[in-house]
Image (cartoon, rainbow, N blue to C red):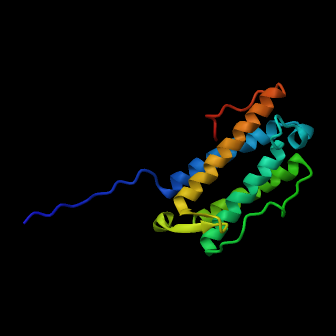
């Protein structure tokens, strides 16, 4: 009698996924830093939101979402809790959220990444898909920031330099 063993190779560890995400966050932080104060809050093209508002969206997703996943709390998404007045406010909160992301991400087991979770009571997907969405959404909005910086005559950071 012959037995066939199935071996599953993992593409990426949770630590590598977090490192990838934090690399994107490092780059987005550098985009925020590249903006002049006034333009960060006021400049837009074609009716898109200023980059400060996009940064607030990103700040309002990562940490709160991971906390919700860990606590199994399906609280609705909202941005109202953070209304920065300066670039320094945004950068300070960005760093605080980085610590929160690291804290809660470490509490999600490999097994839970496959678990379906109704994020913010709206997005019912496996946890790994929600996390990939956080990264995709950040890349999308950072692209808007690159367009803004170029329109302002400012060279944005190289997109491949994430650390």
- For the question of whether residue 154 can be seen, the reply is no
Q: Say which residue appears at 64% left-offset and 45% top-offset.
A: 24
Answer above or below: position of 117 versus 53: below
Q: In the image, residue 4 lies at what x, y percent?
A: 17, 61
* Image quadrant in which you'd find residue 44: top right
Q: Say which residue appears at 58% left-offset and 56% top-offset.
A: 131
The residue lying toward the viewer, choosing from 65 and 97, is: 65
Q: Say which residue appears at 58% left-offset and 58% top-offset.
A: 130
Q: In the image, residue 36 lies at what x, y percent?
A: 88, 36
* The C terminus sits in image quarter: top right
Locate residue 68 relative to residue 150 in the image: left or right: left
Residue lying at the far top of the rendered structure: 153
The residue lying toward the viewer, choosing from 54 and 19, is: 54
Answer above or below: position of 70 versus 125: below
Residue lying at the far left of the rendered structure: 1
* The N terminus sits in image quarter: bottom left
* Image quadrant in which you'd find residue 150: top right
The residue lying toward the viewer, choosing from 152 and 155, is: 152
Q: In the image, residue 48 lies at what x, y percent?
A: 80, 41
Locate residue 128 relative to residue 91 in the image: left or right: left
Q: In the image, residue 7 lies at what x, y percent?
A: 28, 57
- For the question of whether residue 151 can be seen, the reply is yes
Callout count: 0
Locate residue 124 relative to residue 7 in the image: left or right: right
């Amino acid at each position: 009698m012959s037995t066939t063993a199935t071996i599953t190779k993992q593409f990426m560890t949770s630590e590598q996924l977090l490192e990838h995400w934090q690399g994107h966050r490092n780059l987005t932080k550098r985009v925020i830093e590249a903006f002049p104060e006034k333009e960060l809050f006021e400049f837009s093209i074609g009716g898109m939101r200023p980059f400060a508002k996009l940064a607030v969206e990103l700040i309002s997703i990562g940490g709160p979402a991971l906390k919700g996943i860990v606590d199994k709390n399906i609280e609705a998404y909202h941005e109202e809790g953070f209304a920065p007045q300066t670039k320094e406010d945004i950068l300070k909160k960005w760093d605080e959220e980085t610590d929160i992301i690291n804290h809660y991400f470490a509490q999600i087991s490999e097994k839970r990444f496959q678990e379906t979770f109704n994020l913010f009571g709206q997005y019912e997907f496996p946890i790994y898909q929600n996390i990939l969405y956080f990264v995709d959404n950040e890349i999308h909005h950072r692209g808007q920031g690159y367009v803004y910086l170029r329109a302002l005559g400012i060279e944005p950071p190289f997109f491949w330099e994430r650390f």
